[in-house]
């Protein structure tokens, strides 16, 4: 196991009705906030009004900014920075899923670093001087942004999607009220479960040895998602199943399952290009790419993939045939994604063979034009990226 530091500044407030208590949690932190949200769903459901009433009762003033889209646009975040500056906002309160929370994190970064171009921070991984505080009410568990140090933004002018990871990105307070999840469309729930699983896979598939405790926690969380994910897809009003899924999503990406080891993240980099270029739903893209990636790289650490097949997917080992056992595990994962209703080929997003070379080049090229490799378990270059895209096509 490698040396590590782990610190989470996020206070998790979990359970029925907790979204109506947000004012009491925000009052000690700020006198005026920006309520940031996405679609009109939170307006029609009455959630926005309940949040506003709770803030007002606690003596917290607010301004609002809606319109966040899936894969949040850096241009809206820039507008949020200007609005927050003008209104004297002290904290960004995101009410939504991962896209809304990430957009709020970007606004908070822009407020703290007014002399930096906000997109350059993401594109070039610039050093910053911290961030304004962020809090959130989670309405869609998937991205894990409610407790992570990650922020991922899209630039639709340049067709890019970039992440920025710093500890000050973590929200100070995250309210997780599973009663808010009942109206999420089933496809989005399924994609969210795949995203949660990928957050764990990106950490679990590692060459670092002697990580047994973290491995066991990761395996248990994945088994929980495999058991309860289909239940919330089938019945989005199942509160008890949502509790298991929602907490798994938070644990999947707060990095508790990634400490002490080298991580991978190749699948996420490959998937980000599919979102930027074709608008693919992130979790659905990961569901297509992950099995193709597994088949391409498993020989780099066969024992790790045997553990995946037997301890996570529950496959019986084939005597003297490790590769066969691994294949049954990967096939079982594909079957699970299909059970959720997710696609299994890139053609579902409009990807063609002709688009693959350019995508492979982009994901293995730095902003300055120099070449790079992606991944940790096995370093992947342009040809490898193209081969994985082709296998998933």
Image (spheres, rainbow, N blue to C red):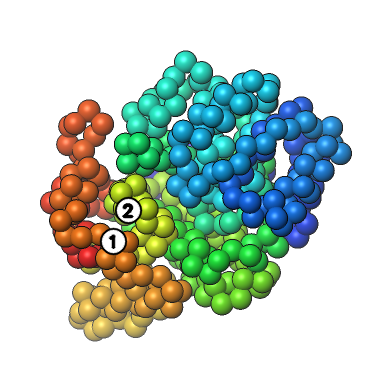
Quarter of the image where one finds residue 57 = top right
Q: Residue furthest right?
A: 57
Residue 273 in percent (x, y) is at: 30, 48
Q: CA gap, disc 1 to disc 2?
A: 7 Å
Residue 211 in percent (x, y) is at: 40, 55
Residue 208 in percent (x, y) is at: 32, 51
Q: Against 320, is 361 above or below?
A: above
- In depth, the one of 166 and 178 nearer the eye is 178
Give the labeled residue for mark 1.
350
Whether residue 331 sits left or right of residue 84 in the image: it is left
- In depth, the one of 155 and 12 nearer the eye is 155
Task: Name the secondary structure under disc 1.
Answer: loop
Task: Name the secondary structure under disc 2.
Answer: helix
Q: Are marks 1 and 2 in contact (CB under 8 Å)?
A: yes
Q: Residue 278 has which mark?
A: 2
N-terminal-most mark, 1 or 2? 2
Q: Residue 317 has which mark?
A: none
Residue depicted at 24% across the width and 44% down the height = 363
Residue depicted at 44% across the width and 26% down the height = 118
Whether residue 306 sits left or right of residue 178 in the image: it is left
Whether residue 239 sits left or right of residue 225 in the image: it is right
């Amino acid at each position: 196991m490698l040396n590590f530091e782990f610190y989470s500044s996020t206070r998790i407030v979990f359970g029925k009705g907790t979204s109506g208590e947000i004012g009491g949690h925000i009052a000690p932190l700020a006198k005026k906030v920006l309520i940031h949200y996405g679609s009109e769903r939170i307006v029609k459901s009455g959630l926005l009004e309940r949040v506003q009433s709770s803030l007002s009762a606690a003596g917290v003033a607010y301004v609002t900014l809606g319109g966040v889209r899936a894969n949040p646009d850096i241009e809206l975040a820039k507008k949020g920075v200007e609005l927050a500056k003008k209104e004297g906002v002290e904290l960004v309160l995101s009410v939504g899923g991962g896209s809304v929370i990430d957009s709020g994190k970007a606004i908070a970064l822009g407020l703290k670093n007014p002399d930096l171009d906000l997109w350059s921070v993401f594109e070039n991984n610039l050093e910053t001087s911290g961030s304004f505080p962020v809090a959130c009410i989670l309405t869609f568990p998937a991205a894990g942004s409610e407790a992570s140090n990650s922020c991922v933004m899209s630039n639709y002018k340049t067709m890019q999607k970039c992440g920025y990871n710093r500890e000050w990105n973590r929200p100070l307070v995250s309210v997780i009220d599973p009663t808010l999840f009942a109206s999420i469309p089933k496809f989005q729930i399924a994609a969210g479960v795949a995203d949660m699983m990928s957050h764990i896979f990106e950490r679990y598939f590692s060459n670092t040895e002697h990580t047994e405790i973290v491995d066991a926690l990761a395996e248990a969380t994945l088994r929980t998602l495999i058991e309860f994910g289909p239940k919330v897809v089938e019945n989005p009003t199942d509160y008890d199943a949502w509790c298991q899924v929602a907490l798994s999503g938070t644990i999947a990406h707060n990095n508790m399952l990634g400490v002490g080891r080298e991580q991978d993240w190749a699948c996420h980099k490959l998937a980000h290009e599919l979102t930027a270029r074709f608008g693919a739903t992130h979790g659905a893209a990961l569901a297509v790419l992950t099995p193709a990636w597994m088949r391409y790289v498993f020989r780099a650490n066969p024992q790790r993939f045997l553990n995946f097949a037997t301890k996570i997917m529950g496959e019986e080992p084939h005597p003297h045939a490790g590769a066969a056992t691994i294949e049954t595990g990967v096939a079982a994962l594909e079957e699970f994604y299909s059970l959720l209703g997710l696609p299994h080929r890139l053609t579902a997003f409009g990807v063609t063979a002709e688009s693959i070379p350019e995508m492979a080049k982009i994901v293995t090229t730095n902003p300055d034009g120099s070449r790079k490799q992606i991944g940790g378990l096995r370093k992947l270059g342009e040809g490898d990226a193209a081969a994985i895209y082709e296998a998933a096509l």
